[in-house]
Amino acid sequence: MRVLHILNHVQEIGNGIVNVAVDLACLQAKNGHDVGVASAGGEYEALLASYGVKHFTLNQKRTPINLINAAWRYRAIVKEFQPDIVHVHMMTGVVLARLLKASSVYALVSTVHNEFQRSSMLMGLADCVIAVSNAVAESMVKRGVPRKKLRVVSNGTLGSVRTRKLQDYLPMALQRPAIATVAGMYRRKGIGELINAFAQIADDFSDSHLYLVGNGPDRTMFEVQAKNTLFANRIHFEGFQPEAQAYMLGCDIFVLASHRDPSPLVIPEAREAGCAIIASNVDGIPEALDDGQAGILVPPANSQALAQALRQLLSSPELLQKWKDQAQQNLERLSVVRVHEETMAVYSELIKTCKVFSMVR
């Protein structure tokens, strides 16, 4: 099978959409398929090349002149590569691939990641739409995407080609008990609520520290918020870390306090690392935590509930260990191999359907 993935870029900046697509492209090539990636480029080009994935430069910056150039460039890529499947992961790509599909015979697949964005409706332009969680699929149905177009392939990142084996990482030497999150510095990631929750419990647990791993446009605001607490010296902004596994291995409690999160890759990684996990009961997070069997679920945007969960774990070493143990159960379904296999099944089904339709015509 010849598969062309379309992304905005392949930069190594912690973008979950890029990470999922890079894993998938590499595993497809490893399993004998001809795979290409069209994007503006980035650090992952070298990794893709090592797996035999061809990279095509495609700048999809949204300016009128550039989009015209992108259309011409996309036509040339399709003509050269002759894909059976075009798999788009971001909004601009799906518009290009649909508008320019008339003269080609490929089947068009999209993956919906951030369905909370209004523009996610555009992903419904594809022949088949992959949702990264059941929650995302239901949301897309409510937005008008026909259920028959939708397939669910839940995210999984364990065994990723982008990372080393877990045992090859050294745990970060954190001041413990250590509470950590790995998330972009955005309001919707609940960083503000996490800082507030830590401030509520920090006086009672004087040895505890909070580690915030990630970058983003709202970081300065969160730094100001932390400085205005009485515990600024125990709240650490670590920036983006390409190997955040070291922080997960070094912490006691991992928190993901997102307001919205379709299917976070960091949850499987925190589970594999054996963290006790507290996370928001929203979108695809419960699915990633086996509906609360592998981590404590709290209401989103609720610092009091988050503080209460932190207090419970920090107060009881036995309870803390229980949740660490439960996080590491049932990890097989969170692998990249499962994502690859289920995605290839979607491709095969779609190509078969397209061939039948072509014969009928």
Image: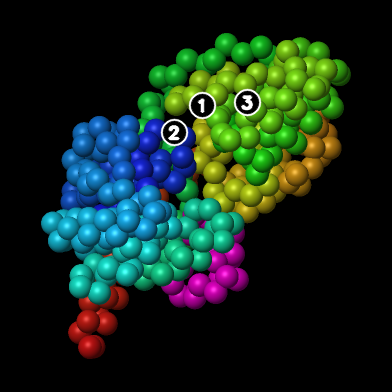
Which residue in the structure is indicated by mark 2? Answer: 13
Q: Secondary structure at mark 3?
A: strand
Residue 122 versus residue 232 in the image, above or below: below
Which residue in the structure is indicated by mark 3? Answer: 212
Give the x, y percent position of residue 349: 32, 69
Which residue lies at the image location 17% right of the left edge and 58% below the top edge? 76
Numbered tag placed on residue 67 in the rendering: none
| Alpha-carbon span between mark 2 and mark 1 | 7 Å
Give the x, y percent position of residue 301: 75, 44
Give the magenta range: 131-151
Q: Earlier in the sequence, mark 3 or mark 1?
A: 3
Which residue lies at the image location 28% right of the left edge and 49% below the top edge? 58
Furthest toward the front, the residue is 65
Residue 203 versus residue 25 in the image, above or below: above
Which residue in the structure is indicated by mark 1? Answer: 240
Camera-nearest residue between 326 and 204: 204
Q: Secondary structure at mark 2?
A: loop
Give the x, y percent position of residue 203: 85, 18
Q: Earlier in the sequence, mark 3 or mark 2?
A: 2
Q: Earlier in the sequence, mark 2 or mark 1?
A: 2
Q: Secondary structure at mark 1?
A: loop
Q: Would residue 346 appear left or right of 352 to someone viewing this image?
A: right
Give the x, y percent position of residue 361: 22, 88
Mark 2 crowdedness (10 Å alpha carbons): few <14, some 14-19, many ≥20: some
Which residue lies at the image location 47% right of the left edge and 35% below the top edge? 14
Mark 3 in CB contact with mark 2 (< 8 angstroms): no
Q: Is residue 158 visible?
A: yes
Mark 3 in CB contact with mark 1 (< 8 angstroms): no
| Alpha-carbon span between mark 3 and mark 1 | 9 Å
| Alpha-carbon span between mark 3 and mark 2 | 16 Å
Mark 3 crowdedness (10 Å alpha carbons): few <14, some 14-19, many ≥20: many
- Tell me which amino acid carries mark 1: Phe
